[in-house]
Image (cartoon, rainbow, N blue to C red):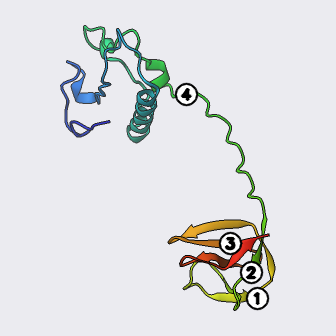
Amino acid sequence: MWRLRPESTVGAHAQGANSDSIGICFEGSYNKESMPQAQIDAGRELVAELKKKYDISKVVRHKDVGNTDCPGKNFPFDAIVAGAQKKPAAAKPAAKPKAVKYKITTKSGVNIRKKPDTKASKVGAYAKGDVVTVSETKTVSGNLWGKTSKGWFAIKYGGASYAKKC
């Protein structure tokens, strides 16, 4: 979508109607072609925005104010100006990540942090041999972190593995 003249500038799109209208051009030959859905969606969004911004109640085609067949017999006028749109597919709820058990393998154990970041506050520690349930994993700066009920710990950090799946 390209903006041509500013909205406050009188256009030259429809003789006799230029001073009190805003012209929108849709690229295509809509006596021969059909408009792609992405262009319909963009047009619908633009028209809705302009209607709201300027409290516009009436939208017309070029042929409604001039001697032309523009915008063409295949132009989806109603879909664009009336806000008709295809219903989006119902969003599936995000699958809850499966909890995975990890066993701490480092001699010194691992720190538990408030966030997956070594600079985050320490809120505790797990000792070597502790088995913890990880509800979520996150990779931050190339390091793998696991979230437990107590906070975050590094599963893999700086290339070293601190825990393994059970």
Rendered image: mark on residue 85: 4
Q: Quadrant of residue 140?
A: bottom right
Is 51 placed above or below 32 here? below
Whole-Å distance between the Cαs marked 3 and 2?
11 Å
Q: Amino acid at mark 4?
A: Gln
Q: Amino acid at mark 1?
A: Ala
For marks 4 and 2 on the same chain, the one whose residue lies earlier in the sequence: 4
For marks 3 and 2 on the same chain, the one whose residue lies earlier in the sequence: 2
Q: Amino acid at mark 2?
A: Ile
Q: Are marks 2 and 1 in contact (CB under 8 Å)?
A: yes
Q: Kindly identify which residue carries mark 3.
A: 146
x then y, percent, for residue 158:
53, 79
x then y, percent, for residue 72:
35, 11
For marks 4 and 1 on the same chain, the one whose residue lies earlier in the sequence: 4
**Badge 2: few (under 14), some or many (20 or more) residues near its Cα, within 10 Å?**
many
**Badge 1: few (under 14), some or many (20 or more) residues near its Cα, within 10 Å?**
some
Say if residue 116 shows up in the picture.
no
Say if residue 99 shows up in the picture.
yes
For marks 3 and 1 on the same chain, the one whose residue lies earlier in the sequence: 1
Q: Kindly identify which residue carries mark 1.
A: 127
**In this view, the mark in front (3 or 1):** 1
Residue at left offset 43%, top offset 24%? 36
Whole-Å distance between the Cαs marked 2 and 1?
7 Å
Q: Are marks 3 and 1 in contact (CB under 8 Å)?
A: no
Q: Kindly identify which residue carries mark 2.
A: 104
**In this view, the mark in front (4 or 3):** 3
Residue at left offset 76%, top offset 88%? 127
For marks 2 and 1 on the same chain, the one whose residue lies earlier in the sequence: 2
x then y, percent, for residue 80:
45, 25
Decide which of 114, 110 is in the foreground and name it.
110
**Badge 3: few (under 14), some or many (20 or more) residues near its Cα, within 10 Å?**
many
Disc 3 on helix, strand or loop?
strand
